Image (tube, rainbow, N blue to C red):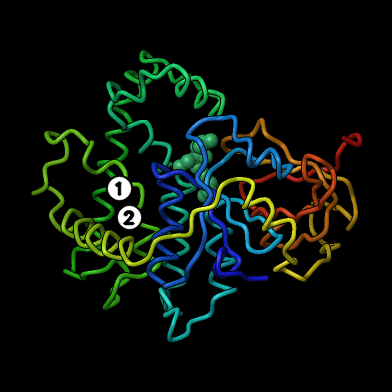
Amino acid sequence: MSSQAVPNDIILFHYAFSPFAKRIVWYLKLRGIKYAECIQPLTLPRPDLNELGINYRRIPLLSIGRDVYYDTRLILARLEQSFPASSSHPSLSTPENKGLEALLEKFTVDAGIFSKAAQSLPPDLPTMKDEKFVKDRAEFTGTSWSPEARAKGYPEALAHIRHAFDILEALLADGRQWIGGTEKVSLADIHAAWPFIWIGDMLPKQSFAKDQHPEAWAWLGRFKKTVKEAEKSSKAVSLDGQAAMQHIVSASYHDQQTGVDNNDPVKLKEGDLVQLWPTDSGFRHKDQGKLVKLNKDEVVLAIQTRSGSNEIRVHAPRWGFRVVKAKAQL
Ligand SMILES: N[C@@H](CCC(=O)N[C@@H](CS)C(=O)NCC(=O)O)C(=O)O
């Protein structure tokens, strides 16, 4: 079911300051895929998600119909699959750049760039003095966000990010405009740029002189201008939590495929009651439900909404998530 109120049956749950959510916002806008959004608070609790029966705490999440996708890596993969290139939704990806895209995504999401970027936020940033925020994020990462701990990790984080700038500079050294050597901005640029766009203006000027990484800064400037333009192009339909919930529970499943790969090393069976959670951050928030699909790319659970009157499906990637047989019924 798709309606005027929910274009393409898509609802993005996010908040404006989430650099991960920007990956999805830019992707949707650059490809001209219209969507609705349900804005979430910066810290827990998130009652809209609780009502849906979702314990996963990370932002963003994206629903398509009655299916809710966790994690930007899976969200982008699903959107790539559901919206093949067309004149209304031109592709952002080229077959010859798939490998580079995957490596750049690993580089920024999995290989420490995001966490070091978070640690390189200025320790005196007003948000870092907000007790509620600091406590919330300590629970999220399982590490201390005290001013002392942040000050201690700051120089190391800056050294890490400076090295990442060296890598970007090397990738752009031949004068290419976009990181994959494409004529226009591509998915490879989204994968490479988002953490640097997030922290770029907050990095200390003395350690990040523009003339030390001229190509990298020029590329970031081009990227920022391009996505700012795209962001202006169309406004997402805004939904409150109730409207989002109503839409999801009355929609059909977007993904009709079910089935568990019996050769998968986790040795689970379709219909098993399982628990699912991310292993790198937000790991204290586990979902429980019936396993409906498991393959090398994703794991899908049928879960009950909080009132118990509806079932929805949640999808997570296979990497950075753990799925195990649940010990007991909820
Ligand atoms: N690997 C996840 C990471 C998402 C993530 O860490 N998001 C941050 C916001 S940018 C978050 O959830 N922070 C804690 C929170 O908002 O509860 C993804 O790709 O979606």
Q: Single out the residue that lies furthest toward the bottom.
A: 87
Q: Single out the residue that lies furthest toward the left.
A: 211
**Residue 125 position by quadrant:** top left
Looking at the image, can residue 266 be seen?
yes
State whether label 2 is within 8 Å of ligand 1: no
Badge 2: how crowded within 10 Å, few (<14), some, or many (20+)?
A: many
Residue 132 higher or lower than 226, as above or below = above
Q: Is residue 297 left or right of residue 202?
A: right
Q: Is residue 208 left or right of residue 251?
A: left
Residue 151 higher or lower than 286, as above or below = above
Residue matched to label 2: 193
Closest to the observer: 32 or 111?
A: 32
Residue 75 x %, y %: 56, 59
Closest to the observer: 230 or 114?
A: 230
Q: Is residue 220 left or right of residue 154?
A: left
Closest to the observer: 269 or 111?
A: 269
**Residue 324 position by quadrant:** top right
Element at badge 1?
helix
Seen at 53% across and 71% down, the residue is: 80
**CB of mark 1 within 8 Å of CB of mark 2?**
yes
Seen at 77% across and 59% down, the residue is: 294
Seen at 39% across and 19% down, the residue is: 130
* Amino acid carrying mark 1 in the image: Phe
